[in-house]
Every structure is written in structure tokens, then in C-alpha cells.
Image: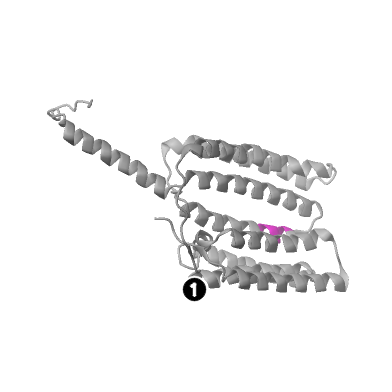
Amino acid sequence: MQQKPIPGQDALVPPDPDVARQYLAAADAVVERRSRAVDRRALAALQIVNAVITAGYLVAFALVLRQSDVLASQVILFSFLVWGQLASGMAQRNGMQWRWSSSRWPLILGEVLVLVGAVVVFGLVALDPSLPVGVVLIPAGIVLLGIGGYGVVQLFRASGDPRSPRPPRVALPAPTRWGTLLVGVALGVLTMLAGAPDDVVRSVITLLVMLVLLAWIAAFNTSVGLPAIGASWRWPHVVTFFLAAGMPVALVLGGGSGGASVLAGVAGGVAVIVLFALVSFVPGREGRG
């Protein structure tokens, strides 16, 4: 064992073979505990999913802005903020630690540059209707290549990691179940508003929903916070969320009007709430140890 000399201090006595073997065994145990606590494969897959979702939201956001539909952009922003909070809980469930370190700065800086570039191109595309509609795919492609590509690299690096044991499926705790239902109610209300003919009523109620979201985000560290809800969700809950989040966007981009649009909004909103009420009884995931 090599050691750096410290001025004014005597050199440490090298350990005997038995102690050295114990040190090595302890180091191996630390690596094993880290592999159980950090699922690099799951984190890489989540990064790829986040890149695909972000790209999809950029496309939808650009399309509604080109139509000058402010309310639709608020609906999309609401859904994206909710997903960001849910995904942070999923990342923490798989062992991600939100710690700043010098070794992570190059990665963080690279992701920030990719996002800034995508946002700049997005602004040009969304605010200039004279550009072809197909250019809305450019910022989405930047996100897919930059962030999604890095996720693919991380997935290949983690391919040799041992498979983590699947956490047992457990019934959602009462706070998480009510939080899941509340997510459905919020998305259901937004779906109903997407078909409402009165822009003033739509804007006022949407603003109220956004204020509720801000208060909910402020309670992120509680048992009913969105990260805690996302940490307990499995794929049925995630699929339900995206089906529900797509309904108000589809209604707005569909361009319907009149009684048919109102009926579609009410029916879609009720369907969203019922879906979340049902999926809240689907077993979720237990936290990783």
C-alpha cells in the first residue's frame, strides 16, 4: 500500500496480510451495496424516456404556439411540470443523488448547452409561422441526439452491471393513492377546459390549476408530493398519465368547436378521472433499500 507522506507526521505502518484482505473485502462490500442502491441501467433508461418525452413536448408546444393558442401552451406546460416532478421521484427511487460535484460539472454543462440550443431553435420555430411546419422537429431532434444519445451511451456502459432484484409490488399507501387521484382530477379538469368555448373561463380556471400545481410542487418533500408519488408508480400508472396528458392536447390541436367540442372535452375529462381512480388501486413499487 502506497501513501503520501505528511510533513511532521510519522508514516503509517503497512497493514499485515490479514488486515489488508479485510480492507479489500470491505471495499468489495461497498461496491456491492452501491450496486444494490444505484440501478444504473434503470437511470439510463429513464434518461432516454425523458429525452423522448421532452422532444414530444417541444413539438406539441411549438405547434400550439404557431396557432397562437395560449391556453393550450399552459396545458402542455402543466403536464410537463408534473412529469418532471414525477420523474425526479423515479430517479431517486433508482439511486440518483442530487449532489453537485466537480466530476459532474462537464456532464451538467453539456446538458445545459444542449437544452439552451434546443430552446433557441424552438423559439425561432414557434414564433415564426412563415417557417415550414416540419422545422418543429429540429429542436426535438437536438434533444434526442444530445440527451437521449447520452442515455444510450450510459445504457451500454451499464450493460455489464448485475441485474438488480425487482422490488416487491405493494399496494399504494393512502397518501400516494390520493395523490395519484388528484393528478387525474387536475388532468381531467384541463381536458374539460380544452373543449370549453369560453376563453375567459378557460383561462381563469387554468390559472387556478397552475397555482394549485405551484403549491403542490412546494410540498415536494412530503408523502403527498409528486416525487413521492412518482417513486411508487409502475408502468400502468405512467402509461395512464401519458394517455391522460395527451387528451387535452389532442382536443386543442384537433381544432373542434361548438357543442361537439364541449361534449368531447367533458367525456374525455370524465374518462381521465375514472382511469386514474382505477389505476390508483394497481399495486406500485416499494422503495429500494
Q: Quadrant of residue 82?
A: bottom right
Q: Which range of residues does the magenta coloring cover?
A: 73-77
In the rendered structure, which amino acid carries the disc numbered 1? Ala
Q: Quadrant of the N terminus?
A: top left
- Say whether residue 39 is left or right of residue 22: right
Regarding mark 1 in the picture, which secondary structure is present there?
helix
Residue 280 in view, yes or no: yes
How many numbered discs?
1
Q: How far across and how far down the image is residue 262, in percent?
A: 81, 72
Q: How far across and how far down the image is residue 249, in percent?
A: 75, 60
- Say whether residue 134 is left or right of residue 204: right
Instruction: Read off the residue under disc 1.
Output: 174
Q: Quadrant of the C terminus?
A: bottom left
Q: How far across and how far down the image is residue 150, in percent?
A: 57, 37
Question: Is 76 in the magenta?
Answer: yes
Residue at 14% from the left image edge and 27% from the top image edge? 11
Residue 197 in view, yes or no: no
Q: Main secondary structure of the magenta part?
A: helix
